[in-house]
Each structure stands twice: as structure tokens, then as C-alpha cells.
Amino acid sequence: MSEQLNLRINAEIERIQDHEIDLNQLLAMQYFPECGGLALFAGTVRDHHEGKAVKSLKYTAYKPLAERLVREIELDIEQKYGVSYVRVVHRIGHLDIGEVAIYAVARAAHRREAFAACEEAVERVKHEVPVWKEEFYHDGTSVFVEGCCIRSDYADVAQKKDIKHAHHQHDHTACSHEH
């Protein structure tokens, strides 16, 4: 086994972290000489949601399950797009406005594949991995934010079966999953 490959394998990071995410560790640039494209997404905590002033957020997850699901998504996307590297790291715990809640990185021979893999990685993690977001507002209230449905095909299934659920009547194309 080459030294570079050994370093690449041993440079594993936790996908669910309760501390600030080390972007340099996530990028691992020196280990991917075959890649000319690098796509990076950073989701930060914003100061508003649906007209309410957000003070901070708290993310929670059952870490063993969330870790496993993120890793499965990464492998699936690497195979689907033929890219060398896909990593997604989601932070849990208390986060203030402006802090990074999620990073996604994809490395590929070309930019197109890197962008596509990065975007799909973020979307799939946000829709498929059980990470719960609680928003704390300046008025002293808090609420667990209901995101888009977990099934990416829910809107199509619901329309075909004429199912109507009040909590799914928002516009799925404009879901607010960025942080």
C-alpha cells in the first residue's frame, strides 16, 4: 500500500461533530493529485427563519446512526458520479449566528462532477440523516424546525395518492434546509 493511500485512509474524520469543524482536515488537498475540481459547501446559521428573529440553534442526533448514514451517502455518491472524494460533516450542539453547521466537499477530475456530487451530498444528508434542529428566538421561544420530508419523492407519491398533510403543504422546491 502506498504511503499516500495509507495517509488517505487514516485521515478519517467524524461526520457528526460536537465542536467546530476543521475545514483543513476535511479538504485533505494533498491526497488527491488526480482531481482538478473541488466543490465546497458551507451551511451557516442565519439570523431569521419564516419571519422570526433567530438567536441561535441547537442540533441533536443519535450519532452512531447519523454517522453510518452519512458514510453510506458519501459512498453512494462517489460511485454514482465517479468522484474520488465526498465528505459531509454536520455539527451538533449549540451554534450561534454565523457558525458553520455543515460542510460538504467533493473532489473530482472535473468541476461539473464535483459540483453535482457536492450538491447531492448536501441534499441527501439534509433529507435522509436524522439530525434535528431546534431554533431559539429573540422573543424567548424555541421550536424544533420541521424540514422537508425525508422521502425525496414524497411530493410525487402524495400527489398520486391525493394525500394531504398540513405539515407537508409548503413548497418543496423552496425548502429551507440551509442553516
Image (cartoon, helix red, strand yellow):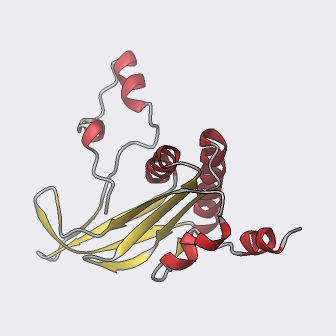
Q: Position of residue 100 (x, y in %)?
A: 37, 73
In x, y percent, where is residue 112?
Answer: 47, 44
Which residue is at 16% across, 77% downward? 140
Closer to us: 14 or 4: 4
| Horizontal side, residue 155 vs residue 76: left or right | left
In the rendered image, the quadrant that contains the C terminus is bottom left
Front one among 164 and 22? 22
* Nearest to the observer: residue 41 or residue 46: 41
Q: Nearer the viewer, residue 33 or 174?
A: 33
> Which residue is pictured at 46% across the width and 72% down the height?
91
Is 123 displayed left or right of 8 in the figure? left
Q: Is residue 95 left or right of residue 5?
A: left
Count of labels in the image: 0
Q: Residue furthest right?
A: 1
Q: Taking 103 as reference, is 163 above or below it?
A: above
As displayed, is residue 41 above or below residue 137? above
Residue 67 % position (x, y): 61, 63
Q: Is residue 166 above or below residue 126?
A: above
Q: Residue at x 34, y 78 (%)?
A: 95
Indicate the position of residue 40 as horizontal and vertical percent values.
44, 61
- In the displayed structure, 97 sits above or below 124; it is below
Location of residue 29 (image quadrant): bottom right
Residue 80 visible to the viewer: yes
Quarter of the figure with the N terminus: bottom right
Quadrant of the image occupied by residue 93 = bottom left
Query: In percent of the image, x 35 and y 45: which residue is there?
Result: 148
* Residue 14 appears in the picture as rendered: no
